[in-house]
Image: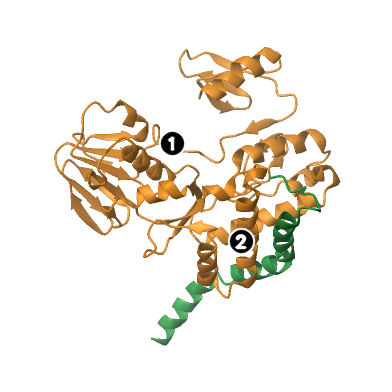
Chain colours: A green, B orange
Amino acid sequence: MVVDISKEDIAKQAVLNRLRSNIPAGMGNLTRLISTLKSPVKLIDKEKANA
Amino acid sequence: MHIFDNVMNHKFLTSDRVSYYPMCEYLGNNKFTSTTSGQAFEVTVNKRTVDATYLNTSVPSTHTPNFSIDNDVNFVPLNNLPIIQAPHSLYVVVGGGKTGIDACIWLLENQVDPDKIMWITPRDAWLIDRKNTQPTEEFFFDTMEAQAAQMEAMANASDIDNLFERLENAGVLIRIDKNIKPEMYHGATISELELAQLRRIKNVIRKGRVTHISKNNIAFEKGENTTPDNTLFIDCSASAIREFKPLPVFNGHVITLQMIRIIQPVFSAALIAHIEAEYQNDDQKNALTQVVPAPNKSNDWLTVNAANMRNQYIWSQDKSLQK
């Protein structure tokens, strides 16, 4: 994809800015979500233990 | 195949820098034998051996299904569809992945009544809208809007179910049946027109994996189905890429080809070749070629995208790769 867009192309620059501005929060939250992936097994075990 | 044949015969071989040994079995230690003549070969490797077999690609025409099939069953790989000589009473597509999708679309395009198609899908998949994956500037808004929407979904999702909900609402991921929660993600792409066609097939069987096929019966992990005489079974159950343990791409005398960009084996191989040619030591080369695993389950969407973004960031910090 060509992302070397002219600064005068406001509409395309707006899309790129929308993408770039969310990268830090996107990476941070994705890392948080991944950390929850391993928890369901423990939750099931805990439920069994409580049963 | 025509493209590969053309590149090999008219570009590589005419360069006098490539030797080609088709129909050979590699034995290790730079030795291989012809499977047709039995002739043995040994070559000198000046730089490194490139192992392009590690991903263990499997295709319908050569793989062995994970279920048993009686001898009197008409069971064919999808490659045989164009040589069908007479109509069948039922077409059973075995496999819910991209190959299964392609077989269903082919049958519908060739005037098969959707009610004469049975589609066996052990797992439903999250799919990518093809219009969001086009690399040219005329698709800028489709592709980059999808990228921006994906990043927003990543940034704002409260949990994993909410992430997929946001991705679907933004049109980043799509599914064939909105009442079924997908368990699979292989990165398959589909167009809106193909999606509409697939939704015409109502006889979709979700009873787990096939365990045995006999002439008039299919046994599944969770049940069975009868089939009429003159049923054609179409094998779409091969797994293109199996799950694998990532290895360092550069390791001693071997380069092990793996994906370093999300579901992009060709781009990955090209960039690995560039890095081998342009960079000096293996630590640096491996830092630039960290493996992005092949996704399988739906939740793999998260981990492969994280690995992909990590590599994208690393490449963006390398002055040579920025160009």
Q: Name the residue located 65 percent from the left edge and 60 percent from the top edge.
A: B148
- Chain name for mark 2: B
Q: Quadrant of residue B163?
A: bottom right
Alpha carbon distance from label 1 to label 2? 31 Å
- B307 is higher (above) or lower (below) than B247: below
Compared across the picture, whether B177 is left or right of B265 comes to left
Q: Name the residue located 21 percent from the left edge and 54 percent from the top edge.
A: B224
At numbered mark 2, what does the secondary structure look like: helix, strand or loop? helix
- The quarter in which the C terminus of chain B is drawn is top right
Q: Quadrant of residue B15?
A: top right
Q: Nearer the viewer, mark 1 or mark 2?
A: 2
- B255 is higher (above) or lower (below) than B10: below
Q: Which residue is mark 2?
A: B150
At label 2, the amino acid type is: Gln
The location of residue B257, given as percent across then percent down, is 63, 39
Determine contact: label 1, label 2, CB under 8 Å: no
Whichever of callouts 1 and 2 sits on the residue coming sooner in the sequence is: 1
The location of residue B119, given as percent across then percent down, is 30, 48
Q: Which residue is mark 1?
A: B59
Q: Name the residue located 60 percent from the left edge and 22 percent from the top edge.
A: B31
Give the class, few, some or many, for how many residues have Cα within 10 Å of label 1's Cα (few <14, many ≥20): some
At numbered mark 1, what does the secondary structure look like: helix, strand or loop? loop
**Foreground: B51 or B299?**
B299
The location of residue B91, given as percent across then percent down, is 25, 41
- Chain name for mark 1: B
At label 1, the amino acid type is: Val
